[in-house]
Image (tube, grey):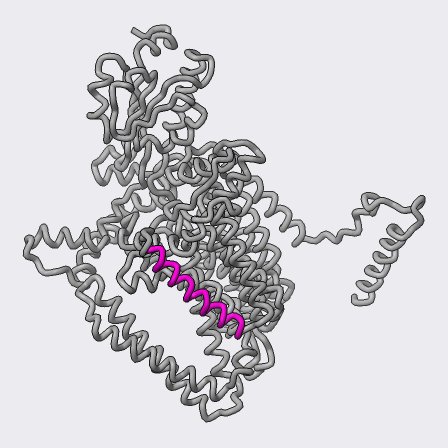
C-alpha cells in the first residue's frame, strides 16, 4: 500500500511539474489539470454535504423573522456606522465587533433584516467547518463528522446562527479556544500561541462572556499544570511531598470557603469572617505550595510545561482588563467618569499594565511583545472604531467588566436556578447532554481522559512522562461542567446563554460517537454483547438526532415568530412587520413615497427605530404625546401609553390592535425559590420563618407530584415537549390563554390611522 501511495504521489508530482515547467507555448493552464486527481471518499462527500446543508439552513429565509428588541439595538448603530455617522461603544449592547461586521455587511449588500444577519450565519457555518476539519485529530474522523452534524442540527446553534446576537460569534471563539489549547498542549507550536491570542482578543471585543471564558481557561490550565507537575520526576524529590500536602490543604480550604458561601445563600446570612479566614488560609497554603514547587522542580522544569506557557500568556494579556476589580474592591464606582474617577481608572489600568509587561517579558522576552501587540492592537482598533473614537478604548478596559458585574445583581430574566441544566438542555440539547454522559462512562472505563498524540481513543501509557498527551475529553467535560456552573450561578439568566453550555456538550457527544464507531468491529464475523451494546447506543443517538432535527426545524422555520418555543425571551411577534407593510402601502398611496408622518412611543421604538429609518417624517415622542401628533397619519403606541394617547386620537383616528412582544409560558416559575417562599408566607403569615432547604424541596415536590400521579399531566407535558402543543395543558388549567390570539404573556400595541387617510385608501370606510 505504501508503495502504491508513493508511486501515485510521484506520478502526480511529475505530471504537475510537466504542466508548470513546460515551455510557455506548451504549458497548460492549471484549469486544464485533470480533476480526477482529487481523491474522493465517503468522508469527503459527507463533509461537503454537511457544509452545503450548513449554508442552506443558515441562509434560507433569513430575513423573515421580525427584528427582536436586542437585534434592533445592534442593527441601528451598525446602520449609522455604515452611513458614516460613527459608532460609540456602549457595554449595554456588548462589544464593538458585531457592529463592525454588520456595518460591513450593510456596506457590501445593503441594509435589511437579511443582510444584518449575514455575519451570524457566516460564523455559524464557519463553526461547523472548524468542527469538521480541525477536530479530526482529537475525536477521530467519525467524531469530527458527528460534531459537524450536531452543530448543524442543534436547535440553539441553528436558531442563533440566524440571529443577530453575539452568540454565533462566541461559539466559534469557544471552539477555537478549545482547539488551540489542545493543539499547544500536544505540540507546543509557537504559531498556536498566535491563534490562542487572536481568538481571545476577538472574544474580548465581542462580549463580556470573554471574562467567563478566560476564567475557565485559567482554572483548567492551572489545575492541569499542577497535575502534570505533581506526577513528573522532580530533581529534588523531598519537596514533592511538601508540595502535595500544601496543595491539598489549599484545595480543602477553598472547598470549605466555597461550600460555606453556597450553602449560606440564600438560606441564611453568610458568616463572612469564617469564609474569609478559610480563604486566607488557602492563600497561605498556595504560597507555601508554590515555594515548594520552585525549590523542588525548579524554574526550568516549570517552564517546560506547556500549560504554564498558556497560563502566563493569557494571564498577562487579560490582567489590565481587570482594572475595574480593584476600584470596586476599594469602594469606588469603576464607571465613574468624573475627573477623580478617570484618574483612579488610569492608575489602576497603568499599574496592572506594568505588572503584565514585567511578567510577560520574564516569561518570553521575544514572543510576548509580539503577542501583546496582536492582542491589544485588535482591542484598540475595534474599540476606537479604527481610531475615530479614542474614548472607546477606556470603555473596553473599564466599562465591559464593570457594567456586567453590576448587572449580575439585577438578575435580568429572573429565571430559576435549574433553568439551564434541568429545563433548557432537556428541552433542546438532550442529544449532546446524553452523548456527553456516554463519553464520561467510556472515559472512566477506558481511561481516556487523556490520549496519545494523534490517537484520540488510545490511552496514555502510565509513566510515559516524555509523551505530551492531548487531554481532549478532560478539557471538554471540564468545559461543559464549568459552563453549566458559571451560567447557573450568574445573576443574569437568558435562554441564548444555553448555547455556551451546548458547545462542549456537542463536542463530548461527538467524541462518544467517534469512539463507538471506531471501536466497533463492523467487519467481525462474531459479535459479543459489548459490540451489541455499542450499536444500540449509536442507534439511540441516531433516534435522538432525528428528534433534535425535528425540534430545530420547528423552532427555526415554523415557530420563529411565535411564543411556543422556550429558546427565546421577550420575542418579537410577526405583527410589527405586518403593520410596517401597511404603513408603507399607506405612505405610497398618499404621498407617492415614504414621506408619511408616522409617530411611535418609547416601547414601539423597538422595532420601529429600525424599520422606519427611511421615513424622514417619523416622530419618536417617547412617553410624552403632544398636540403636534395630530398631524401624524399613523400613530403606534404600546399598551403602557394607551391612556396617554387617548385624548389625542379619540375623535379623529380609527384604532387597530396588534401583538408586539410575547414571552414563552413561564409557569415553571412556580418552582423558583422566591415563588415558593411567597407561598410559604401566604400559608403561614407574614411572620413565617425563612424557607429552609427542606421546606423548599417539600413544596417543590408538591408542584411536581401530579406529573407522576396524573396521566393527564404527563400527557400535557409530553405534548409541550414533543409538539409544542399547549391545548392539553390549557385544558388542565381550564384556560384559553395559550393560543396566538390570546397568549398569556404578551405586550400589545395599537395603531391609530387618521380617518381622512383611512377614507383615501379604503373604498368602504364609513
The residue lying at 22 percent from left, 35 percent from top is 735
Going by the image, does 443 lie left or right of 409? right
- The reply to whether residue 175 is visible in this rendering is no
Q: Position of residue 126 (x, y in %)?
A: 57, 49
Taking depth in this image into account, of 316 and 232 the one nearest to the observer is 316
The residue lying at 32 percent from left, 26 percent from top is 600
Residue 500, relative to residue 118: is it above or below?
below
- The quarter in which the N terminus is drawn is bottom right
Dominant SS in magenta: helix
The residue lying at 30 percent from left, 33 percent from top is 603
In magenta, the rendered stretch is 341-362
Q: Quadrant of residue 283?
A: bottom left
Residue 393, relative to residue 80: is it above or below?
below
- The reply to whether residue 725 is visible in this rendering is yes
Q: Quadrant of residue 350?
A: bottom left
Q: Position of residue 46 (x, y in %)?
A: 63, 50
- The quarter in which the C terminus is drawn is top left
Q: Position of residue 55 (x, y in %)?
A: 58, 42
Residue 120, relative to residue 611: is it above or below?
below
- Check the image and name the residue furthest to the bottom: 238
Going by the image, does 753 lie left or right of 368? left
Amino acid at each position: 500500500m505504501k508503495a502504491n501511495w508513493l508511486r501515485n504521489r510521484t506520478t502526480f508530482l511529475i505530471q504537475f511539474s510537466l504542466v508548470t515547467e513546460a515551455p510557455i507555448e506548451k504549458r497548460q493552464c492549471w484549469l486544464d489539470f485533470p480533476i480526477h486527481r482529487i481523491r474522493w471518499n465517503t468522508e469527503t462527500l459527507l463533509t461537503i454535504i454537511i457544509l452545503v446543508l450548513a449554508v442552506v439552513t443558515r441562509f434560507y429565509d433569513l430575513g423573515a423573522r421580525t427584528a427582536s428588541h436586542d437585534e434592533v439595538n445592534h442593527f441601528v448603530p451598525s446602520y449609522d456606522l455604515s452611513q458614516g455617522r460613527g459608532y460609540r461603544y456602549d457595554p449595554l449592547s456588548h462589544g464593538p465587533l458585531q457592529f463592525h461586521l454588520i456595518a460591513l455587511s450593510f456596506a457590501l449588500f445593503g441594509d435589511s433584516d437579511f443582510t444584518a444577519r449575514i455575519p451570524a450565519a457566516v460564523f455559524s457555518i464557519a463553526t461547523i467547518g472548524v468542527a469538521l476539519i480541525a477536530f479530526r485529530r482529537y475525536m477521530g474522523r467519525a467524531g469530527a463528522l458527528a460534531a459537524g452534524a450536531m452543530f448543524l442540527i442543534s436547535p440553539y446553534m441553528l436558531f442563533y446562527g440566524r440571529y443577530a446576537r453575539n452568540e454565533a460569534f462566541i461559539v466559534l471563539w469557544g471552539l477555537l479556544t478549545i482547539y488551540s489549547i489542545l493543539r499547544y498542549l500536544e505540540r507546543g507550536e509557537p504559531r498556536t500561541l498566535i491563534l490562542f491570542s487572536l481568538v481571545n482578543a476577538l472574544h474580548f471585543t465581542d462580549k463580556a462572556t470573554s471574562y467567563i471564558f478566560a476564567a475557565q481557561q485559567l482554572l483548567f490550565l492551572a489545575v492541569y499544570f499542577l497535575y502534570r507537575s505533581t506526577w513528573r520526576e522532580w530533581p529534588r524529590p523531598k519537596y514533592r511531598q511538601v508540595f502535595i500536602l500544601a496543595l491539598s490543604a489549599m484545595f480543602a480550604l477553598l472547598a470549605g470557603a466555597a461550600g460555606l458561601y453556597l450553602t449560606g445563600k440564600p438560606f441564611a446570612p453568610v458568616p463572612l469572617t469564617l469564609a474569609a479566614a478559610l480563604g486566607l488560609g488557602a492563600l497561605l497554603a498556595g504560597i507555601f505550595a508554590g515555594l515548594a514547587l520552585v525549590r523542588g522542580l525548579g524554574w526550568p522544569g516549570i517552564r517546560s510545561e506547556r500549560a504554564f506557557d498558556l497560563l502566563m500568556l493569557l494571564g498577562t494579556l487579560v490582567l489590565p482588563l481587570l482594572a475595574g476589580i480593584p476600584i470596586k474592591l476599594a469602594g469606588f464606582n469603576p464607571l465613574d467618569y468624573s475627573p477623580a474617577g478617570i484618574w483612579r481608572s488610569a492608575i489602576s489600568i497603568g499599574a496592572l499594565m506594568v505588572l503584565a509587561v514585567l511578567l510577560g517579558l520574564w516569561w518570553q522576552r521575544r514572543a510576548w511583545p509580539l503577542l501583546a501587540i496582536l492582542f491589544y492592537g485588535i482591542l484598540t482598533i475595534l474599540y476606537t472604531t479604527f481610531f475615530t473614537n479614542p474614548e472607546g478604548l477606556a470603555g473596553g478596559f473599564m466599562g465591559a467588566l464593570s457594567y456586567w458585574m453590576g448587572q449580575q445583581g439585577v438578575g435580568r430574566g429572573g429565571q430559576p436556578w435549574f433553568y439551564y441544566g434541568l429545563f433548557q438542555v432537556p428541552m433542546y440539547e438532550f442529544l449532546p447532554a446524553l452523548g456527553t454522559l456516554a463519553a464520561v462512562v467510556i472515559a472512566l472505563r477506558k481511561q481516556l481522559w487523556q490520549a496519545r498524540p494523534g490517537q484520540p481513543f488510545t490511552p496514555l501509557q502510565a509513566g510515559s512522562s516524555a509523551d505530551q498527551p492531548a487531554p481532549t475529553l478532560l478539557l471538554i467535560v471540564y468545559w461543559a461542567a464549568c459552563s453549566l456552573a458559571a451560567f447557573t450561578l450568574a445573576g443574569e439568566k437568558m435562554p441564548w446563554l444555553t448555547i455556551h453550555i451546548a458547545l462542549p456538550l456537542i463536542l463530548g457527544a461527538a467524541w462518544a460517537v467517534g469512539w463507538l464507531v471506531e471501536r466497533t468491529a463492523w467487519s467481525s464475523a462474531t459479535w459479543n454483547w459489548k459490540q451489541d451494546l455499542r450499536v444500540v447506543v449509536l442507534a439511540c443517538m441516531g433516534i435522538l438526532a432525528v428528534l433534535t432535527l425535528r425540534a430545530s426545524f420547528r423552532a427555526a422555520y415554523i415557530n420563529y415568530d411565535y411564543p411556543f418555543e422556550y429558546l427565546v425571551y421577550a420575542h418579537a411577534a410577526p405583527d410589527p412587520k405586518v403593520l410596517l407593510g401597511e404603513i408603507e402601502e399607506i405612505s405610497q398611496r398618499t404621498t407617492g413615497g415614504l414621506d408619511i408622518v408616522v409617530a411611535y412611543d418609547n416601547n414601539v421604538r423597538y422595532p420601529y427605530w429600525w424599520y422606519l429609518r427611511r421615513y424622514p417624517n417619523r416622530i419618536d415622542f417617547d412617553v410624552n404625546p403632544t398636540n403636534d401628533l395630530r398631524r401624524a397619519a399613523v400613530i403606534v403606541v404600546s399598551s403602557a401609553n394607551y391612556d396617554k394617547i387617548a385624548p389625542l386620537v379619540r375623535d379623529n383616528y380609527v384604532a387597530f390592535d396588534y401583538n408586539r412582544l410575547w414571552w414563552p409560558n413561564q409557569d415553571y416559575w412556580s418552582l423558583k425559590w422566591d415563588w415558593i417562599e411567597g407561598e410559604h408566607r401566604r400559608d403561614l403569615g407574614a411572620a413565617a420563618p425563612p424557607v429552609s432547604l427542606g421546606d423548599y424541596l417539600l413544596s417543590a415536590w408538591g408542584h411536581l407530584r401530579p406529573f407522576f400521579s396524573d396521566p393527564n399531566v404527563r400527557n400535557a407535558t409530553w405534548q409541550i415537549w414533543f409538539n409544542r402543543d399547549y391545548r392539553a395543558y390549557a385544558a388542565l388549567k381550564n384556560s384559553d390563554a395559550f393560543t396566538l390570539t390570546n397568549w398569556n404573556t404578551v405586550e400589545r400595541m395599537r395603531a391609530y390611522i387618521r380617518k381622512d387617510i383611512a377614507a383615501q385608501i379604503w373604498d368602504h370606510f364609513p
